[in-house]
Image (cartoon, grey):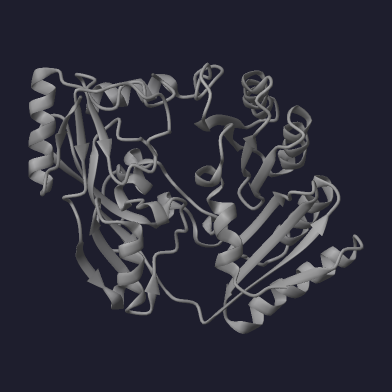
Amino acid sequence: MPHVERPATAEACAEALRACADLRHTVRVRGGGTKDGLGTRRETDVVLETAGLDGIVDHVPEDLTVTVRAGMSFAALRDALAAHGQFLPLDPPHVARGATVGGIIAANSNGFGRYRYGGVRDLVLGVRAALPDGAVARAGGRVVKNVAGYDLNKLFIGSLGTLGVVVEATFKILPVPPTARAASATFATPGDAFAVAGALLRTSLRPTALVVERTADGRWRLVIAAAGEAAPVERAMAELRRAAAARGTAVEAIDEPEAALDPLREIVDLADGGVVVRAVLPLSAQAAFAEAATGVDRGARVVADAASGIAHVQLRDEAGIVVAADGLLAGARILGGSARIERAAVAGLDPFGGPEPSGAFLMRRLKAAFDPTGILEPARSALG
């Protein structure tokens, strides 16, 4: 069993990493444990838990910024900001299971609101990170207008803990919007659903969610959510009605937007077995990828963020599921995108599949510079 470290300060975290580097002990970084399925799971000598790095460091409501420790749960941060009428405009998955701020940054975990508000990379102003040489590095700052130095904080976003351990982060935040509404329209084919989504994206609207899902009866449901002042929110609903009517489909109002979006956001957690593939695609390729998914598995569940080109497919048919998953990984590359296995209940799958990502040489250079002994998260990334 690996030894567990739970540092309570950034300095203690850095010292724990330095000791591991000296002893060549490999380290897995764990926040809420909600991203444990990402990448290849290899046993490590040490599990470094960030739960002791909890709480808000600084909140300046007037400046719309908040600085928090990495082990704080996103749910707790959300509740704390709501008491001031503010929110961090991220809607990542796994919040109910305890997703932490550090884990969201390390996994670059975004939700459907990315199109409207930007993703983790856009909302993080600065980070502090513990490094294997015992240092605590700072990148970025605590103010919105910060242009000094290199933008090194983005190196840690999506790094899965392979470069260092994020111990603190500063975010841009916003006032809670006064109005929020949602509606849906259901179509017979993915081509129609994505065509209407594309028509909405070509307007000046900035919806907070634009999602296409394959329903249990094999149809394709487009869900739009909007938040802000009443007039632009109503215009978003009207645009959906107009675009859907052009294809002979009616629109249904959704009384509780979050209740409708939450099971779509949590497709990975709600998957009852099988394999979940996550693909990042050009917007124009989404319909073709959806058709390919149902071609390899007639019972496949598909949820696509139509505004960002990120699709999740749950393959359920166990007969030939490994071949089907490998086929989807290859299909995403053929369509100009990329894909990885997000969750699998079967063995024999390469989580990333296919050739190394572009820029692999530079990634290795960065890994060697930040973690020269290679102790952090072995085999976790696409580079191994």
162 sits left or right of 197 in the view:
left
Q: Is residue 142 visible in this depiction of the protein? A: no
Q: Point out residue 141 in the picture as x, y percentages from the top left corner.
A: 24, 56
Please state which of residues 41 and 110 is positioned toward the viewer in this rendering.
Answer: 41
Residue at left 62%, top 32%?
A: 337
Q: Quadrant of residue 277?
A: top right
Residue at left 30%, top 67%?
A: 65
Q: Quadrant of the N terminus?
A: top left
143 sits left or right of 277 in the view:
left
Q: Point out residue 227 in the picture as x, y percentages from the top left corner.
A: 57, 73
Q: Point out residue 9 in the picture as x, y percentages from the top left corner.
A: 10, 49
Please state which of residues 7 and 362 is positioned toward the viewer in this rendering.
Answer: 7
Please state which of residues 143 and 185 is positioned toward the viewer in this rendering.
Answer: 185
Residue at left 39%, top 57%?
A: 123
Q: How many marks?
A: 0
Please state which of residues 179 and 150 is positioned toward the viewer in this rendering.
Answer: 179
Residue at left 52%, top 29%?
A: 344
> Does residue 71 sit above or below 338 in this rendering?
below
Q: Quadrant of residue 129?
A: top left
> Does residue 133 sit above or below 148 in this rendering?
above
296 sits left or right of 133 in the view:
right
Q: Point out residue 174 in the picture as x, y percentages from the top left corner.
A: 41, 71
Q: Quadrant of the C terminus?
A: top left
289 sits left or right of 65 in the view:
right
Q: Is residue 255 visible in this depiction of the protein? A: yes
